[in-house]
């Protein structure tokens, strides 16, 4: 029953969030701030993680495909498709749930326990819409760009690491990247990124908006938000893969 209670309250919150904004200029200013705070400030960690993961996958695939019967270009192909299909969308969303999600929960939760949200509502402001809607739009907007950046730097990481470690030559890796490319893989993962972006913003916002207690409870809510967001990301990854890829 507790599960259905949270589901119902989550959708009730979304109904409040999606209400018509009172002042569009105020929302636009908040949206630009959230894009910078939640999106642009995440580019650095996305680049670093993607470069290392791209290099690691290239080395691992080179050892997995050591059989001389396998053409060496398969290393580049496997690295590219793994980045396109899974890592740069799903795994990156799991990482961002920890960074962005905990940020959203702690920010909104702190405003709740210090009664700032109550003050906004007393003044007639739709606090749910004002605080949460710009965050959802910002994260959904920025996630496809983070996905593209991740794929690019992941492939670049493999491009540098492969020749440096002697596991694959540069021409062989480039041939693998260009071989049997399926453009729909990118479209599929961008769709996933949009869904994941919505989850990463809305679920932590829910836990922060309804937190009760003090600072310690905000910390607990942040942990709950990240765990539940990760579970939902994996669940929707399974559903979307079944619907869109098979």
Image (cartoon, grey):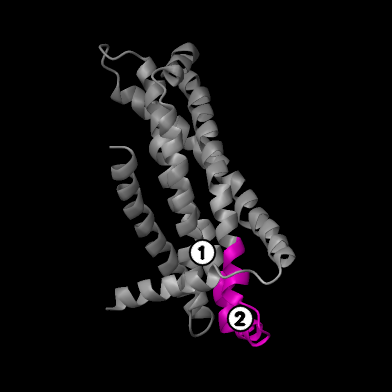
Residue at mark 1: 102
Mark 1 vs mark 2: give the one in front. Answer: 2
Give percent across and percent down for residue 123. Answer: 68, 85
Q: Residue at x 38, y 22 (%)?
A: 75
Residue at mark 2: 117
From the viewer's perspective, is residue 195 above or below residue 46? below
Dot label at residue 159: none
- Find numbered disc 2 in the image and state the secondary structure of the residue it sits on: helix
| Location of the N terminus (image quadrant) | bottom left
Check residue 125 for magenta coloring: yes
State how far apart marks 1 and 2 are (Cα).
Answer: 18 Å
- Find numbered disc 1 in the image and state the secondary structure of the residue it sits on: helix
- In screen coordinates, is 118 left or right of 87? right
Disc 2: CA contacts within 10 A as few (<14), some (14-19) or many (>=20):
many
From the viewer's perspective, is residue 17 above or below residue 181? below
- In screen coordinates, is 74 left or right of 131? left
Q: Residue at x 65, y 57 (%)?
A: 37
Disc 1: CA contacts within 10 A as few (<14), some (14-19) or many (>=20):
many
In the foreground, 75 or 208? 208
Q: Residue at x 36, y 71 (%)?
A: 7
Q: Mark 1 or mark 2, which has the lower sequence index?
A: 1
Q: Residue at x 45, y 14 (%)?
A: 175
- In screen coordinates, is 167 left or right of 154? left
Give percent across and percent down for residue 28. Answer: 70, 60
Visible in this render: residue 24? yes
The quadrant in which residue 82 appears is: top left
Q: Which residues are magenta?
A: 106-134
Give percent across and percent down for residue 150. Answer: 52, 38
List the single residue furthest toward the front: 20
Which SS type dominates the magenta stretch?
Answer: helix
From the viewer's perspective, is residue 120 above or below residue 23? below
Q: Are marks 1 and 2 in contact (CB under 8 Å)?
A: no
């Amino acid at each position: 029953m507790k599960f259905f209670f949270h589901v119902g309250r989550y959708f009730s919150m979304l109904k409040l969030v999606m209400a018509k904004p009172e002042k569009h200029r105020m929302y636009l200013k908040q949206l630009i701030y959230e894009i910078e705070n939640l999106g642009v400030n995440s580019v650095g960690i996305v680049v670093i993680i993607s470069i290392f993961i791209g290099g690691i996958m290239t080395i691992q695939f080179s050892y997995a495909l050591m059989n001389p019967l396998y053409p060496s270009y398969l290393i580049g192909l496997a690295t590219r498709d793994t980045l396109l299909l899974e890592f740069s969308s799903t795994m990156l969303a799991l990482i961002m749930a920890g960074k962005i999600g905990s940020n959203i929960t702690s920010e909104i939760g702190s405003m709740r326990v210090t009664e700032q949200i109550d003050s906004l509502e007393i003044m007639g402001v739709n606090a749910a819409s004002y605080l949460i809607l710009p965050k959802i739009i910002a994260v959904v907007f920025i996630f496809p760009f983070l996905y593209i950046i991740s794929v690019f730097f992941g492939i670049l990481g493999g491009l540098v690491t492969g020749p440096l470690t002697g596991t694959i030559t540069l021409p062989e890796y480039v041939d693998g990247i260009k071989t049997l490319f399926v453009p729909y893989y990118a479209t599929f993962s961008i769709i996933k990124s949009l869904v994941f972006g919505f989850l990463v913003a809305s679920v932590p916002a829910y836990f922060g908006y309804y937190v009760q207690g003090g600072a310690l409870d905000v910390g607990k809510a942040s942990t709950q938000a990240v765990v539940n967001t990760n579970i939902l990301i994996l669940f929707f990854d399974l559903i979307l893969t079944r619907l869109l890829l098979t």
